[in-house]
Amino acid sequence: MILFPAIDLKDGQCVRLKHGEMSSATVFNDDPGAQAQTFEQQGFKYLHIVDLDGAFAGKPANANAVESILRSISIPAQLGGGIRDLATIEAWLGKGIARVILGTVAVRNPALVREACKKHPGRVAVGIDAKGGKVAVEGWAETSELTAIELAKRFEDAGVAAIIYTDIERDGALKGLNLPGTVALARETSIPVIASGGLASMADIDALLAPECAILAGAISGRALYDGRIDPAEALKRLAGNPLSPGAGRGPG
């Protein structure tokens, strides 16, 4: 199972939001490249980046920060936020992003997801952000009537590399991952599912080692890494030593 450290970008800085509210941003580092380098030095193998301003604006808004991250690391990075058309997808892949994450556009324009997957196999993931089980869009500012499982099923045969499932009500709140909801989603799709939102402590890392979580491909942690609630070396060691995880030895695409 892969543990992804998260870098959320707002105004060029690394921040964490609480419940997806831009007004609740806490700045953790004003040098995203240095933060990314720290994560690589700590032993992480894959970075998760979100352009928060881009998610709300509908177009990339932290390009300089993302590019500084890419210059600073040798590990792969996935990026979401404000990626709404093929030109933007291809621009980011061309700049060195290993995998783009499509969120709002997956609800609004599923044909684009299919086209992107066809053109760039293994390099397109779908971000499903849910509030009360319903999919949220436009930087979490709106909730649709779709359920997370319904959205995942739409892309079953599209060639999506992974689904990043975020429980908004837990994101940045250090309440623990919504593992029952995430595992339920993973059981309904053949697409690898990555858990996100609320990973708060080493107890949550241990919860990921439970047999029912072996179906998950990975998990994302943000705030708990920044404020020291999770020991990176110990967390990586525990997850690497889990013989049940299907993610062991398998890249996320």
Image (spheres, rainbow, N blue to C red):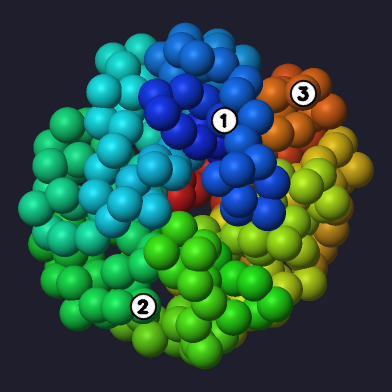
In the rendered view, would you say 54 is above or below 160? above
Say whether residue 80 is left or right of residue 170.
left
In the image, residue 229 sits, relative to residue 116, either above or below, namely: above
Look at mark 2 in the image and give the residue it sits on.
107
Q: How dense is the environment of label 2, judged by Cα within 10 Å: few (below 14), some, or many (20 and up)? A: some
Report how far apart the C-alphas of labels 3 and 1 lie in the structure. 12 Å
- Disc 3 element: loop
Pick the residue in front: 206 or 109: 109
Residue 144 is situated, as x and y percent measured from the top left of the image, at: 49, 82
Residue type at mark 1: give it.
Val
Dot 2: element: helix
Q: Is label 2 or label 1 in front?
A: 1
Q: Quadrant of residue 83?
A: bottom left
Q: As shown in the figure, which amino acid type bears the numbered disc 2?
A: Val
Kindly identify the residue that appears in the image at 32 percent across and 32 percent down: 62
Q: Tell me where residue 5 appears, x and y as whole percent.
A: 58, 33
- Residue closer to the observer: 192 or 14: 14
User: Contact, CB < 8 Å: mark 3 with mark 2?
Assistant: no
Q: Is residue 43 left or right of residue 213?
A: left
Q: Is residue 100 left or right of residue 193?
A: left
- Residue 227, label in figure: 3
Callout 2 touching callout 1 (CB < 8 Å): no
The picture places residue 57, in percent across and down from the top left corner, at 31, 52
Q: Residue at x 16, y 60 (%)?
A: 85
Contact between marks 3 and 1 (CB within 8 A): the answer is no
Determine the residue positioned at 50% across, 87% down: 146
Mark 3 vs mark 2, CA separation in Å = 34 Å
Above or below, 17 against 218 in this view is above
Q: Which residue is mark 1?
A: 15
Q: Amino acid under label 3?
A: Asp
